[in-house]
Image (cartoon, rainbow, N blue to C red):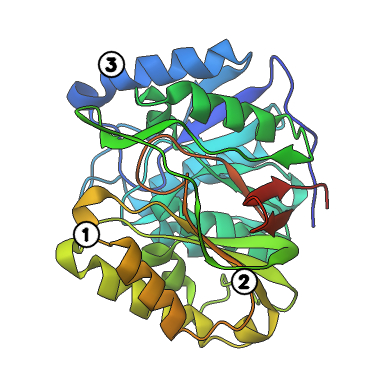
């Protein structure tokens, strides 16, 4: 694994938009709140040149988005790169990335959802770990925001080993908040391996490309999905998971499965999710569901490419030094 130094006070974080661009009217207040919270951790926040560009489907041109990406990695003063938000088009910039520059300047890319393709592609191409965590605008959300910020800071500062803890309250929108139940054990056991994965709806876009991880060493799969498929979310999650399990080396090296919390509108019930996992015949690997990551708030920050230990004995998930 290609490593980088822990973040420290005064370090610069560059915000770029590999997917959806910034909407001035909608995002101005959210952006300011997110910037203030990031700065409260002691970091300098700067922005790419093309966050406001609108070309098609809410995004800037792929060339513009790739330029911001490459410039962020080339800039020695930038110590971490963070996605503005998710979307649908991050994989368009993969062929335009200067991979030599990325490999020569190890630093984490931070984000989730559509950013899954970039985080895992960077790991596959260079061995550099990335952080499946909040997007920049996620930091403006109000539900248990301190939980998101505290875990985010612990990972940036690489305070490992880090014992992950569940939130107290979660929700998909401010008007709908729920008391967090214990993370759910679907299969018992323990595992120690690197984390790979993220949002399945984007992760499987890497299949058949040079940007897909090879799964050639023991790993724990991180998996979540959004609710865009509505009542078909469970079926989509099941077949996306199946498509990954059929890839070379996956069933040989998968050591565990962490499943993020589904949005309420997905209608994925505990019973349905348990039946999906049972149908995959995963053997005796541990499976823990309803973990605090995915398309709800708050969210953990999970280092892709770094070693984690999971155990269903008292439901423990911890991040370790590689």
- Circle 2 Cα neighbour tier, 10 Å, few/some/many (<14 / 14–19 / ≥20): some
In the displayed structure, 72 sits above or below 66; it is above
Label 1 or label 2, whichever comes before in sequence order: 2
Q: Which mark is residue 32?
A: none
> Circle 3 sits in a helix, a strand or a loop, which is it?
helix
- Circle 3 Cα neighbour tier, 10 Å, few/some/many (<14 / 14–19 / ≥20): few
User: Between tags 3 and 1, which lies in front?
Assistant: 1
The image position of residue 237, as x and y in percent, is 34, 70
In the displayed structure, 27 sits above or below 238; it is above
The residue lying at 69 percent from left, 26 percent from top is 77
The CA span between labels 2 and 3 is 37 Å
- Circle 1 Cα neighbour tier, 10 Å, few/some/many (<14 / 14–19 / ≥20): some
Label 3 or label 1, whichever comes before in sequence order: 3
Q: For this view, does 2 lie left or right of residue 214?
A: right
Q: For this view, does 162 lie left or right of residue 71?
A: right
Q: Which residue is mark 1?
A: 267
The residue lying at 53 percent from left, 40 percent from top is 300
Which of the 4 image quarters holds residue 88? bottom left
Label 2 or label 3, whichever comes before in sequence order: 3
The residue lying toward the viewer, choosing from 177 and 230, is 177
The residue lying at 69 percent from left, 79 percent from top is 253
The residue lying at 23 percent from left, 30 percent from top is 23
Q: Which residue is mark 2?
A: 213
* Contact flag, marks 3 and 1 (Cβ < 8 Å): no
The image position of residue 276, as x and y in percent, is 38, 76
Q: How many marks?
A: 3
Q: For this view, does 210 lie left or right of residue 127?
A: left
The residue lying toward the viewer, choosing from 110 and 231, is 231
Q: For this view, does 260 lie left or right of residue 132?
A: left
Q: Is any atom of residue 256 visible in this view? A: yes
Image quadrant for the N terminus?
bottom right
Q: Which residue is mark 3?
A: 29
């Amino acid at each position: 694994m290609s490593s980088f130094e822990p973040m420290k006070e005064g370090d610069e974080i560059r915000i770029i938009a590999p997917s959806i661009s910034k909407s001035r009217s909608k995002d101005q207040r959210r952006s300011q709140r997110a910037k203030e919270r990031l700065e409260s951790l002691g970091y300098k926040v700067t922005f790419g040149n093309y966050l406001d560009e609108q070309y098609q489907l809410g995004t800037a041109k792929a060339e513009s988005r790739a330029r911001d990406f490459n410039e962020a990695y080339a800039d020695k003063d930038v110590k971490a790169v963070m996605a503005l938000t998710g979307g649908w088009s991050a994989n368009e910039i993969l062929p335009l990335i200067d991979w030599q520059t990325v490999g020569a300047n190890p630093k984490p890319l931070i984000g989730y959802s559509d950013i899954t393709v970039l985080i895992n592609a960077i790991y596959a191409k260079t061995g550099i770990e990335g952080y499946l965590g909040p997007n920049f605008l996620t930091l403006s959300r109000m539900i248990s925001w301190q939980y998101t910020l505290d875990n985010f800071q612990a990972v940036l500062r690489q305070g490992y080993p880090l014992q992950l803890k569940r939130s107290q309250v979660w929700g998909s929108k401010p008007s709908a908040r729920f008391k967090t139940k214990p993370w759910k054990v679907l299969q018992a056991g323990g595992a120690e391996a690197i984390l790979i994965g993220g949002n399945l709806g984007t992760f499987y876009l890497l299949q058949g490309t040079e940007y897909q991880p090879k799964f050639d060493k023991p790993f724990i799969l991180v998996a979540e999905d959004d609710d865009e498929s509505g009542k078909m979310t469970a079926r989509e999650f099941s077949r996306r998971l199946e498509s990954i399990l059929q890839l070379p080396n996956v069933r040989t090296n998968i050591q565990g499965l962490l499943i993020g919390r589904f949005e309420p509108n997905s209608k994925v019930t505990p019973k349905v999710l348990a039946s999906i996992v049972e149908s995959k015949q995963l053997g005796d690997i541990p499976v823990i569901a309803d973990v605090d990551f995915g398309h709800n708030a708050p969210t953990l920050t999970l280092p892709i490419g770094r070693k984690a230990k999971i155990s269903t004995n008292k439901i423990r998930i911890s991040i370790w030094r590689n």
